[in-house]
Amino acid sequence: MDNKTQVSEFILLGLSQQPLQRQVLFSLSFILYLSGCLGNLLTILAIVLDPHLHSPMYFFLSNLSLLDICFTSTIIPKMLVNHLCGLTTISFSACLAQMYFFLTFGAAESMLLSAMAYDRYLAICSPLHYMTIMSVLRCTLLVMIPWISANLISMVHAILMSHSSFCTNRIPHFFCDLNALIKLSCSDTQVSEMLVLVLGSSVILIPFVCIMASYTSITVAVWKVPSVQGKWKVFSTCGSHLCVVCLFYGTIIGVYFNPASTHTTQRYMAATVIYTMVTPMLNPFIYSLRNRDLKGALRKLFIWSPFAKPL
């Protein structure tokens, strides 16, 4: 108890302490961040500017792209600036803010992926009633609920951390991760750990179970389609979403819901990099490569671009 202290700033140890590795990781992080932001921004612009894409599926996709931009922008720019300026510190208030927004965007994305699975379920299993059920009001609610719920959950964690004392200010991570802060705390963390489990289950496991239930129904519906070509056509409409779900939930569950005894620093860092940098970067490419309508909208976007050469 004598080691308790109210820290004014934290030291982020980063991905590596080796100078050469830090240079390589900086370059890789910059490329992944720039590619992810550009890809997601182009996806949003293509959907907004093309009237043919003004449907519930693309409405959810544009919100997913926005979340991906916000998600990575919460942590990567700070890491890049720290590297360029030779700094490793972050103030206590900035650390809490980073943790808050990181949890908010991550939780909102998890719940939005569940809403997207529900949308695909209705489109395939109830096509005649799809447009009636997926009204503008319902689509708006399915987007607003994740945002509101995620903010409330993040606020609970931020308030608990703001009243904690810490034994050290050295965070063995490249951003202010909730689990890392809990491990550094000298206060009683039983409530925080219980909330991580309970609230984490509510925003990760429950949406994941809902997604699996939706895809189970979709698989049954696809199985009833008589032709192989018809089965492939129906399943291809949700193949991109399924790929994104596997990437996102696979790494999240691996980081936060595995026994602590199986964690190593390298394994933990690798999984974190995948879901904070790689997955947001891959999402727009996964959707654009597998979606003919979106590819067409992106071509039109490049044609309309002021930088495009006149024909």
Image: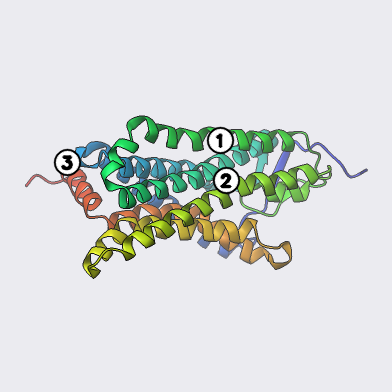
Q: Which residue is mark 3?
A: 304
> Earlier along the polypeptide chain: callout 2 or callout 1?
1
Image location of residue 10, percent across then percent down: 71, 43
Q: Which sits earlier in the primary sequence, circle 1 or circle 3?
A: 1
Earlier sequence position, callout 3 versus callout 2: 2
**Of helix, strand and loop, which one carries label 3?**
helix
User: Label 1, on which residue?
Assistant: 149
Most distant residue in the bottom direction: 228
Element under disc 2: helix
Asked which secondary structure carries label 1, the reply is helix
Whole-number angstrom distance, CA of label 3 to CA of label 2? 40 Å
Distance CA(mark 2)–CA(mark 1): 9 Å
For label 2, the residue is 203
Q: Residue at x 9, y 44 (%)?
A: 310
Q: Residue at x 33, y 31 (%)?
A: 136
Contact between labelled residues 1 and 2, with CB atoms less than 8 Å apart: yes
Relative to 295, say whether 144 is above or below: above
Residues 255 and 204: in front is: 204
Q: What amino acid type is highlighted by mark number 1?
A: Ser
